[in-house]
Amino acid sequence: MPNAPSEARAQRAAATPAAAPQDAAAASAAAADAARLALAVAAPAPAQVPAAALELLSSVQPELPERILSRMRRDGEVTLVFRVNPDGSVADLNVQSSNNAALDAIALDAVRQWRYKPIGEARTHRVQFVFKRE
């Protein structure tokens, strides 16, 4: 009795047509395209030059009124996010986080007056103020 699994494999192999020369050329072209695509995707990104540190030319420190200081139960923290323009001015100030809303306006008013050394292009910057109870 012939071995059934090996006969089935032989029949499948016989039923599978050999690749025609056209199909082989198309497969080769597709493989080459895939290789080029893989190379394009795998190419490393160009090295980026780290941005120079921002240089603060003038700053105004927030002034904490005694009436607010006397009501503070713990140290206050305000984190601001803003844009430094190419001319060194400050714009688009926003409070990112705060644990005392009464301190927000004080911090915003101070940073609005800050000036940085001019830079090549606008950059986002973040600063945190910690108001200590003493």
Image (cartoon, rainbow, N blue to C red):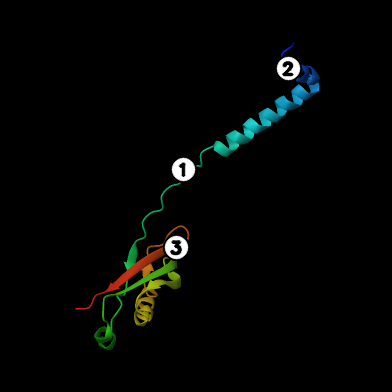
Residue found at the far left of this picture? 134
**Please, is residue 35 above or below residue 130 in the view?**
above
- Residue 95, numbered circle: none
To which quarter of the image does residue 61 belong? bottom left
Q: Earlier in the sequence, mark 3 or mark 2?
A: 2
Residue placed under numbered mark 1 in the picture: 47
Among the 4 quarters of the image, the one containing residue 43: top right
Label 2 belongs to which residue?
4
Q: Secondary structure at mark 3?
A: strand
- Residue lying farthest to the top in this orientation: 1
Q: Is residue 11 left or right of residue 90?
A: right
Taking the spot 46% from the left edge, 43% from the top edge, the residue there is 47
Q: Residue furthest bottom?
A: 67
Marks 3 and 2: which is nearer the front?
2
Identify which residue, 120 or 106, lies in the foreground: 106
- State the residue in front, 66 or 16: 16
* Mark 1 to mark 2 CA distance (whole Å): 62 Å
Amino acid type, callout 1? Ala
- Work out how far the residue at label 1 is from the one at label 3, CA to CA, in angstroms: 21 Å
Looking at the figure, which quarter contains the N terminus? Answer: top right
Q: Secondary structure at mark 1?
A: loop
Q: CA distance from mark 3 to mark 2?
A: 73 Å
Above or below residue 80? Residue 45 is above
Q: How many marks?
A: 3
Q: Is residue 14 above or below residue 52?
A: above
Q: Nearer the viewer, residue 69 or 87?
A: 69
- Give the foreground label among 1 and 2: 2
Taking the spot 27% from the left edge, 86% from the top edge, the residue there is 71
Whole-percent x, y for residue 113 in the image = 37, 75
Mark 3 — residue?
A: 124
